[in-house]
Image (tube, rainbow, N blue to C red):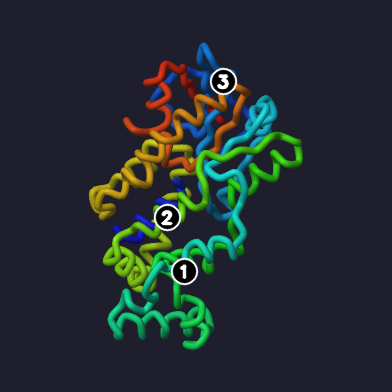
Amino acid sequence: MGLKRFFFIVYLLFQFTSQAQDQPDSLASTLLWKIEGEQSKVSYLFGTIHLIEKEYFSFPKLLEKKLLKCDQVVLELSEIPAEDQVQKLLQLDSGYFRDFFTQVQYDSLIDWSKKNWGMSPTLFNRTFEKLPPFAFSQMTTQMKYLSNAISYDRYIMEFAQKNKLKIGGLESIETQVQLLKNIPRELQTQMAMESIRNVAKNDSLFKLMQTYYMAQDIQALNELIHDKDANLDGFTEDLLDHRNEAWIPKMQLEMAQASTFFAVGAGHLSGKNGLIQLLKNKGYRVTPIFLK
């Protein structure tokens, strides 16, 4: 299950009720945090999950109120990229999808796709020919959950557009895609194979992740990411730590200019290299807002 855990982390990097209050508790279980500093406007940091089933989704009035207090919204990306744009960026620089697998493995993927998606071998070859194995792993989850799922990023972006709030981003889609393409070849191959071999366990992990998110337990989410069985092989630093460090100066610049509502994957919040601690290291006062 470790390799599939790697994939689900993307959704952290990836429930509330109507009442809340600001309280100083650095270890609090909450997804919403207030940021205050001498040279900045009062801002907020909210942890999202990039894909969640509808029954787990909640966006209370208090959260809307805090969002509307801000002058702008800054997400990981400034806009939701079009599918064809992502597909183009994901294209392998050299070689083909099938080069990552033995013939037996490749035949297994084709058979599974025909049985579960009704995808003919011809269509399978055409669809994945120049894509990395990660794309197949992603598709196994999206095909199962997307019709009954919501993206917090899209919801927040549409809310901001409706209320005429400025929208910005902390990084580019090119940066995010390149991180995924940099996953070692062997790891990508194993991820693709596990996505069809351990379906029940993968479903269990996705449910667990959503349960932690609904409980706003950012410590549990952090432990899920850093679990010793996750087989991340150093990619925790690439996916989280290095990105967090790169985001801090951008966040500082945004907060110096305007009150900002930051919305990033919940996996970026906690831990010694998480955004909350990094902001505190820079002298900001970061306090939890409990949504109960």
Q: Which sits earlier in the primary sequence, circle 1 or circle 3?
A: 1
Query: Callout 2 environment at 10 Å: few (<14), some (14 to 19), or many (20+)?
Result: few
Mark 1 against mark 3, which lies toward the viewer?
3
Q: Position of residue 96 (x, y in %)?
A: 39, 76
Quadrant occupied by the C terminus: top right
Say what secondary structure mark 1 lies in. helix
Secondary structure of the residue carrying numbered label 3 = helix
Q: State which quadrant residue 93 falls in.
A: bottom left
Residue that badge 2 annotates: 178
Residue 26 - label: none
Q: The disc labelled 2 sits on which kind of residue?
A: Gln
Callout in the foreground (2, 1): 2
Residue 213 point in image, percent of width and height: 47, 43
Q: Position of residue 135 (x, y in %)?
A: 45, 66
**Distance CA(mark 2)–CA(mark 1):** 20 Å
According to the image, label 1 marks what residue?
A: 140
- At label 3, which amino acid type do we have? Ala
Tell me which label, 2 or 1, sits earlier in the chain: 1
Q: Which residue is mark 3?
A: 256
The residue depicted at 47 percent of the width and 21 percent of the height is: 286
In this view, 286 is above or below 243:
above
